[in-house]
Image (cartoon, rainbow, N blue to C red):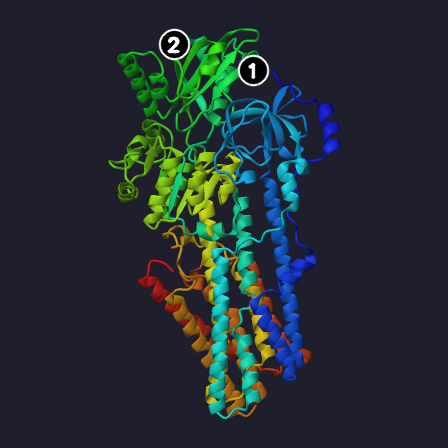
């Protein structure tokens, strides 16, 4: 081997001397800073103001409770954010950069962090340069140094030129010797000075921020309304002020931010268990809205384990040498060719490869569709130009008659109908002096050597998964570089019958105007012989038609399409550039994993919707009670402390646990959610109004009867408070599903922690009423058995009303 690399002993010494090849980690916030960050929240600001106002009105118990709530809320937020930080750090560790090196005379793949000065590194298209170094030899090698220079044009690199850590191989291949690692590299010096950047808020975060802002505006409006009603009803300014404080507490959804964050984080963890590594929080939400998936079948719909099943050689020895020497072992196809060579009798591909040196290379590109190398024996002026690539391209480079070309292409068509991927082989004897004259556009006439056919069998579960996707209303567009016959055969295996107008080849697509593509793209199912640039056009056309597009890819040239797609998806073996552009990485390269992630996205949307609905409906129950008492000129049925008890103790845990509801059966039987679909529809707001008016009417009636009519104000307040408490605890039952009544809900027992919390909450309310200490703090009165029975009957009636409304809505609408 020309460059045997470092020995194991040398590597250990150098690692001790220079340390790991790593840049400074992003500054991780300390525990104290994470805790203090929880206070930077509009809701917390309002709670703190309420705490101060409670002190002003001499409600010291309320003030203490408010401040305890703020601390507990911050502690919970701190716990979740700290866990999230640990989770994201763990996810980041899963995607460790790797480098192809030569050590102890053998090619190896190692983690880039283990590189040391003197290492021999092999570089290919789409890879990041893992350290600063010097090029030893290069073949049409260009590096994208925009990360350092800002220049978009790639820079050609030749032997003895420097390459830098973090730059990207835009074209060609090279061998480099590492000169500097870690902090001593150029990018390491820059990284040391970079300040921590703030991640912009996601769309969901902005929506929630808008919701909180709206709630605060409503609260302010209600305070103004309270002032006018109270003023003209004869209340003193001090009484109006106290009522306004209670209203502010009632409308604040204290647990909303924590609940939503937890839902998203847990969804990311669930997706990771299902082999989908989601890099961006926004992607969790967007996945639920995906309406079209553009997928490259190789490795996702198929097993990605290529094997040579057919060959037809004119000169077997030359053909085998072409397969061996025109090979970088950089993908599943080249590995399959190497395995084929290893199975040949009396042929050692490793020995042939090691005995010849490569002096020239044109890497494979989806644009020119072939790879070429020049290899020479040691101390010899005689060399061979080896070429492998698309049959129609390679055949055109050979001195073949038209009848010979037709015979070859007919065979290609026949093999293609069997679903084979076909490569053509050719070579040419040249002398060393002629190598300098070679270029992409200047190659000599070649000698035709034959064909090899490779088969990549469909995944066993792919057919079933495609059926699930179609049932979920997701349109599938298969985009491949394969021949139409190969792709059609695979599609047939997967249960797709490609009809007229449903297949377009790359050369046809090239002739389409943007408007023509836009008018036809919805009907096309299979795109063949497509270039990465055409992938971008397909994505743009679909998005202009209102589709939410997920796109799979793996190469550096796929990056524009992956970035433009609403969800960019890469396989685990994708280029680093593609990975950095994508929103999600498939750790098992399986189409089933994409559908699983979409399913998680839909569940996330529904659970956030349920949680927001539950929180808002509870707030409006309390608001309706307070405004009702104000309009009737009654004393307030609820105190600040009682409202906080309901919101934090009764609602708080249930707000969060409701977000952990398992998926409903129908979640993948309905069409995708629209990207702009609101969290709460008109139906949900109507249901909130029904719940609020029903529960508030019941609570006010009890307050009037027991408190004003019978003259026991404390009993009246206790009954009104318990009505709100029971509503808060038990109304979560019908909210768990908007599709069906709770007695037909298949997941009724599927969220045991929610059911357990409801039971504990009910028991806790009984204890609060009969325990003297808590009874005095909350200003309650011990109830008789029939009081409890009355409360439960009224709540049951309201739940029945909710279920009837749900049934009517579901009977007249296809989705909830």
Mark 2, secondary structure of its residue: loop
Q: In which quarter of the image is residue 131?
A: top right
Residue named by callout 1: 350
> Which residue is more in the foreground, 254 or 750?
254
Q: Position of residue 230 (x, y in %)?
A: 49, 88
Would residue 52 appear left or right of 155 to someone viewing this image? right
Number of residues whose C-alpha sits closer than 10 Å to that of mark 1, classed few (under 14), some (14–19) or many (20 or more) = few
Question: In the image, what residue occupies the spot 47% across and 61% down?
Answer: 207
Instruction: Say if mark 1 contacts mark 2, CB within 8 Å.
Output: no
> Which residue is more in the foreground, 120 or 292?
120
Q: CA–CA distance between discs 1 and 2?
A: 23 Å
Mark 1, secondary structure of its residue: helix
Say whether residue 346 is visible. yes
Q: Is residue 805 above or below residue 118?
A: below
Number of residues whose C-alpha sits closer than 10 Å to that of mark 2, classed few (under 14), some (14–19) or many (20 or more) = some
Question: Which circle's residue, 1 or 2, is located before the other in the chain?
Answer: 2
Residue named by callout 2: 314
Would residue 681 appear left or right of 95 to someone viewing this image? left
Q: Position of residue 239 (x, y in %)?
A: 56, 88
Q: Is residue 549 above or below residue 577?
A: below
Give the quarter of the figure containing the N terminus. Answer: top right
Q: Position of residue 433 (x, y in %)?
A: 49, 10
Would residue 401 appear left or right of 668 to someone viewing this image? left
Q: Position of residue 434 (x, y in %)?
A: 46, 11
Give the quarter of the figure containing the C terminus. Answer: bottom left
The residue lying furthest to the left in this view is 500
Q: Quadrant of residue 174?
A: top right
Say whether residue 611 is visible. no
């Amino acid at each position: 081997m020309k460059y045997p690399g470092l020995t194991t002993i040398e590597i250990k010494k150098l690692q001790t001397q220079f340390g790991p090849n790593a840049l400074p980690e992003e500054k991780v916030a300390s525990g104290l800073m994470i805790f203090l960050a929880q206070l930077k929240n509009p809701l917390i600001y309002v709670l703190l103001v309420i705490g101060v106002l409670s002190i002003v009105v001499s409600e010291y118990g309320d003030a203490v409770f408010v401040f305890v709530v703020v601390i507990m809320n911050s502690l919970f937020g701190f716990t979740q954010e700290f866990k999230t930080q640990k989770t994201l750090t763990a996810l980041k560790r899963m995607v460790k950069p790797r480098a192809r090196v030569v050590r102890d005379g053998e090619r190896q793949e190692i983690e880039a962090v283990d590189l040391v000065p003197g290492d021999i590194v092999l570089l290919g298209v789409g890879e990041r340069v893992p350290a600063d170094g010097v090029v030893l030899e290069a073949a049409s090698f260009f590096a994208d140094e925009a990360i350092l220079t800002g220049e978009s044009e790639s820079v050609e690199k030749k032997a003895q030129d420097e390459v830098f850590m973090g730059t990207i191989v835009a074209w060609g291949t090279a061998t480099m010797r590492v000169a500097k690692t870690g902090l001593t590299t150029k990018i390491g010096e820059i990284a040391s000075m970079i300040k921590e950047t703030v991640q912009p808020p996601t769309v969901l975060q902005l929506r929630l921020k808008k919701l909180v802002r709206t709630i605060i505006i409503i609260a302010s409006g209600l305070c103004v309304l309270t002032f006018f009603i109270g003023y003209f009803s004869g209340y003193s300014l001090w009484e109006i002020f106290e009522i306004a404080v209670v209203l502010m507490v009632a409308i604040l959804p204290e647990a909303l931010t924590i609940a939503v964050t937890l839902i998203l984080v847990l969804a990311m963890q669930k997706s990771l268990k299902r082999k989908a590594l989601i890099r961006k929080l926004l992607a969790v939400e967007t996945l639920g809205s995906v309406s079209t998936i553009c997928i490259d079948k190789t490795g996702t719909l198929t097993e990605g384990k290529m094997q040579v099943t057919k060959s037809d050689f004119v000169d077997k020895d030359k053909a085998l040498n072409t397969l061996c020497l025109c090979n970088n072992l950089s993908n599943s196809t080249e590995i399959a060719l190497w395995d084929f060579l290893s199975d040949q009798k009396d042929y050692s591909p490793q020995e042939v490869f090691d005995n010849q040196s490569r002096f020239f290379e044109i890497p494979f590109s989806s644009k020119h569709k072939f790879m070429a190398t020049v290899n020479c024996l040691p101390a010899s002026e005689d060399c061979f130009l080896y070429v492998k690539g698309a049959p129609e391209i390679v055949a055109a480079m050979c001195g073949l008659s038209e009848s010979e070309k037709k015979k070859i292409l007919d065979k290609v068509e026949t093999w293609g109908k069997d679903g084979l991927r076909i490569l053509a082989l050719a070579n040419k004897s040249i002398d060393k002096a002629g190598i300098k004259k070679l270029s992409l556009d200047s190659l000599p006439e070649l000698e035709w050597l034959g064909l090899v056919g490779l088969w990549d069998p469909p995944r066993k579960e792919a057919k079933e998964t495609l059926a699930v996707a179609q049932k979920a209303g997701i349109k599938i567009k298969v985009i491949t570089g394969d021949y139409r016959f190969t792709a059609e055969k695979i599609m047939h295996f997967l249960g797709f019958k490609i009809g007229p107008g449903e297949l377009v080849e790359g050369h046809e697509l090239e002739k389409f105007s943007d408007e023509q593509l836009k008018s036809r793209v919805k009907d096309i199912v299979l795109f063949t012989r497509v270039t990465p640039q055409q992938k971008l056009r397909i994505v743009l056309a679909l998005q202009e038609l209102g589709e939410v597009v997920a796109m799979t890819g793996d190469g550096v040239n796929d990056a524009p399409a992956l970035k433009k797609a609403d969800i960019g998806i890469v396989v685990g073996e994708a280029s680093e550039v593609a990975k950095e552009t994508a929103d999600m990485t498939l750790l098992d390269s399986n189409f089933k994993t994409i559908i699983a992630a979409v399913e998680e996205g839909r569940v996330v949307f529904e659970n956030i919707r349920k949680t927001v609905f539950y929180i808002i409906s509870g707030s409006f129950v309390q608001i309706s009670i307070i405004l009702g008492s104000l309009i009737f000129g009654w004393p307030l049925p609820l105190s600040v402390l009682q409202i906080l008890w309901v919101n934090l103790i009764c609602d708080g845990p249930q707000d969060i646990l409701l977000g952990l509801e398992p998926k409903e059966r129908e979640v993948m039987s309905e069409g995708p959610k629209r990207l702009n679909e609101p969290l709460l529809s008109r139906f949900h707001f109507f249901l909130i109004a029904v719940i609020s008016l029903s529960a508030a009417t019941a609570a006010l009636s009890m307050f009037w009867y027991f408190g004003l009519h019978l003259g026991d104000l404390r009993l009246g307040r206790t009954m009104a408070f318990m009505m709100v408490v029971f509503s808060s605890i038990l109304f979560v039952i019908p909210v768990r599903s908007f599709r069906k009544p709770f007695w037909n809900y298949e997941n009724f027992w599927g969220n045991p922690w929610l059911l357990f919390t409801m039971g504990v909450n009910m028991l806790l309310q009984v204890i609060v009423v009969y325990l003297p200490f808590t009874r005095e703090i909350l200003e309650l009165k011990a109830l008789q058995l029939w009081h409890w029975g009355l409360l439960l009957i009224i709540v049951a009636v309201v739940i029945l009303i909710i279920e009837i409304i749900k049934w009517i809505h579901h009977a007249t609408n296809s989705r909830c």
